[in-house]
Image: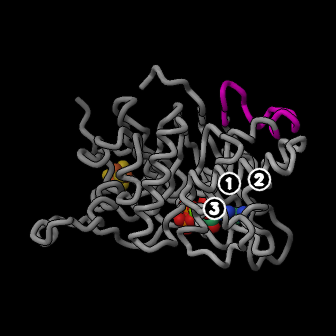
């Protein structure tokens, strides 16, 4: 794995949003909402990192900060050796070609007034204005073929396509500049289960063909299982477990990861009936006022006094780490 070139090095990334205090009589300093609270990971060429966690855990904010759509509060996003936040605007614009994003709502993320040909071509025209109309059309139609869309549909509008086809349009648009990394923010959550598998398989085969790296975000561990080399589990802006996909699925360490895994239905009905379920009690606490100590302690059946006061660090091997006091180290 280490022979593959390092693309992305995210170091202790924090993203906070200022939220005006509700019902304040006088002006007072806004609250700070800690959406991402110290996330570090590396991504190499051709690899996929799956990112999972409940709604509100900070997955999209992490993605948006990497791609420069929200400002980084602290930490670094190092892309091929450059800290992106420190790059001059023009240099960042150039780099941005290599980092693209696919969104959750396939139809909603496409401009309804543009033909799909224009939607896919838009980034190409922005970055390569010298290309002739025919060259652009040629490249768009080739990309349409690659993602499984009929090239003669180039002048149709998004509403004429199904959800799965709209996601293929989004993938074609993301790929048209031949990026090195695509961040897929819940790309299949809005699709039927049968279509989900088609889109995941398409991304996998494109990744293989183009040596792409992917960050694949999902709510649950089942969706990212077949596409991820590594998996990061997020809870309330924190990375609570990270490791090779096999280690996460076969030997989960953190109680939160175990709970997420036990929510996946087993394919065999007998195994499903007999399996031990670690239910997640309660709700995600507010990231404006996160719990002291271990952020998971308010929902953890193993929590003790230490968990309420001290915050566990990530421990283990670089290939599999988790943040919990109860993990036995060799
Ligand atoms: N622009 C913003 N301003 C203020 N708060 C924000 C902003 N964007 C996100 N948040 C808050 O940051 C936290 C993390 O949100 P985020 O969208 O990153 O979570 P998520 O894990 O992607 O959730 P979901 O699975 O529902 O998409 C949430 O509490 C959210 O309300
Ligand atoms: S540190 Fe404590 S509260 Fe946190 S996950 Fe481990 S046992 Fe649960
Ligand atoms: Mg999200």
Mark 3 falls on what kind of element? helix
How packed mark 2 is, by other alpha carbons closer than 10 Å (few <14, some 14-19, many 20 or more), is: some
Q: Which residue is mark 2?
A: 137
**Does the magenta segment cover residue 88?**
yes
Q: Position of residue 48 (x, y in %)?
A: 47, 42
Q: Residue at x 29, y 69 (%)?
A: 279
Q: CA distance from mark 2 to mark 3?
A: 15 Å
Q: Which residue is mark 3?
A: 169
Q: Nearer the viewer, residue 112 or 308?
A: 112
Residue 252 seen in render: yes
**What quarter of the picture does the C terminus occupy?**
top left
* In the foreground, 130 or 312: 130
User: Callout 3: few (<14), some (14-19), or many (20+) C-alpha neighbours within 10 Å?
Assistant: many
Q: Sequence-wise, which precedes: disc 2 or disc 3?
A: 2
Query: Please, is residue 51 above or below residue 163 in the view?
Result: above
Q: What's the magenta region?
A: 77-93
3 or 1: tag closer to the N-terminus? 1
The colour scheme used here is: one colour
Relative image position of residue 148 (x, y in whole percent): 54, 58
Residue under numbered circle 1: 141
Q: Are marks 1 and 2 in contact (CB under 8 Å)?
A: yes
Residue furthest top in the image: 3
Ligand 1 location (quadrant): bottom right
- Give the quarter of the image for residue 274: bottom left
Which quadrant would residue 222 be assigned to in this image?
A: bottom left
Percent from the top left, x then y, of residue 89?
A: 87, 38
Residue 47 vs 158, above or below: the answer is above
Does dot 1 land on a helix, a strand or a loop? helix
Q: Which mark is residue 158?
A: none
């Amino acid at each position: 794995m280490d022979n593959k070139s390092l693309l992305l090095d995210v170091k202790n990334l924090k993203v906070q949003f200022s939220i005006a205090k509700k019902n304040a009589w006088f002006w007072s300093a806004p609250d700070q909402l800690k959406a991402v609270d110290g996330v570090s990971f590396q991504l190499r060429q051709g690899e996929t990192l799956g990112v999972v966690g409940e709604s509100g855990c900070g997955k999209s904010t992490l993605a948006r900060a990497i791609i420069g759509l929200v400002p980084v509060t602290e930490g670094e996003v190092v892309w091929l050796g450059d800290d992106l936040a420190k790059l001059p605007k023009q240099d960042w614009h150039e780099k941005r070609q290599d980092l693209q994003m696919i969104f959750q709502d396939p139809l909603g993320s496409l401009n309804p007034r543009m033909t799909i040909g224009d939607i896919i071509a838009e980034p190409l025209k922005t970055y390569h204005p010298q290309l002739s109309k025919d060259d652009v059309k040629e490249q768009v139609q080739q990309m349409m073929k690659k993602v499984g869309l009929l090239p003669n549909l180039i002048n149709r509008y998004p509403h004429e396509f199904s959800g799965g086809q709209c996601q293929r349009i989004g993938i074609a648009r993301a790929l048209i500049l031949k990026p090195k990394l695509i961040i897929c923010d819940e790309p299949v959550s809005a699709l039927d289960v049968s279509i989900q598998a088609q889109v995941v398989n398409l991304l996998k085969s494109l990744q293989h063909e183009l040596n792409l790296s992917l960050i694949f975000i999902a709510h649950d561990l089942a969706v990212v299982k077949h596409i991820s080399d590594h998996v990061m589990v997020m809870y309330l802006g924190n990375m609570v477990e990270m490791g090779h996909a096999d280690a996460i699925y076969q030997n989960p360490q953190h109680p939160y990861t175990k709970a997420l895994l036990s929510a996946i239905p087993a394919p065999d009905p007998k195994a499903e009936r007999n399996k031990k379920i670690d239910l997640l009690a309660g709700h995600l606490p507010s990231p404006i006022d996160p719990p002291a100590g271990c952020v998971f302690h308010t929902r953890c059946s193993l929590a003790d006094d230490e968990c309420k006061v001290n915050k566990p660090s990530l421990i283990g091997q670089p290939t599999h780490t988790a943040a919990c006091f109860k993990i036995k180290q060799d």
